[in-house]
Amino acid sequence: MEKVEKDVDKHPIKTYIYSMKDREINIKVANITPKQWTNLVIELNLMSEAWKPYGPKIKLKTRNLERIIKWGRSKNETVGKNRRSGSKLESNEESDL
């Protein structure tokens, strides 16, 4: 009986707060193309946004982070358009070359 009382945490809130330290991960990436780097940063940002409701606050730091995220969130307006005339093509229509 003494052992059980000895192992019980008398201050669980203090212990929980103490164990909630900031943790840091440094990722060094080599031999990666610019497109792969952009995709990696966008995926890490998506992960951080998805985990936000569950508690972890993930902060990313890299050069041009805001620009990469802005590019990743933009919609590609040129897909499905005839680039020469700017008019929208139907699914069964071909571009005049």
Image: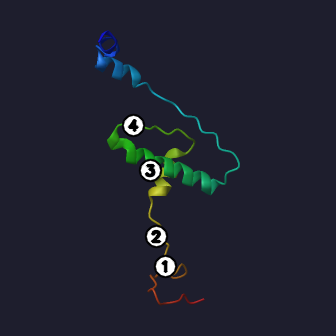
Q: Nearer the viewer, residue 16 or 49?
A: 16
Instruction: Check disc 1 and give the amino acid type.
Output: Lys
Q: Is residue 74 above or below residue 62?
A: below
Of mark 2 and mark 3, the one earlier in the sequence is 3
Of mark 3 and mark 4, the one earlier in the sequence is 3
Q: Nearer the viewer, residue 82 or 68?
A: 68
Q: Position of residue 68 (x, y in %)?
A: 52, 51
Q: Are marks 1 and 4 in contact (CB under 8 Å)?
A: no
Q: Quadrant of residue 58?
A: top left
The Cα–Cα distance between marks 1 and 3, rounded to whole angstroms, is 28 Å
Name the residue beneath numbered marker 3. Answer: 46
For the residue labelled by badge 2, is the local secondary structure a helix, a strand or a loop?
loop
Name the residue beneath numbered marker 1. Answer: 81
> Is label 3 or label 4 in front?
4
Q: Is residue 3 above or below residue 42?
A: above
The residue sitting at 56% across, 90% down in the picture is 96
If the image is split into quadrants, where does the C terminus sit?
bottom right
Q: Are marks 2 and 1 in contact (CB under 8 Å)?
A: yes
Name the residue beneath numbered marker 2. Answer: 77
Q: Position of residue 79 (x, y in %)?
A: 49, 74
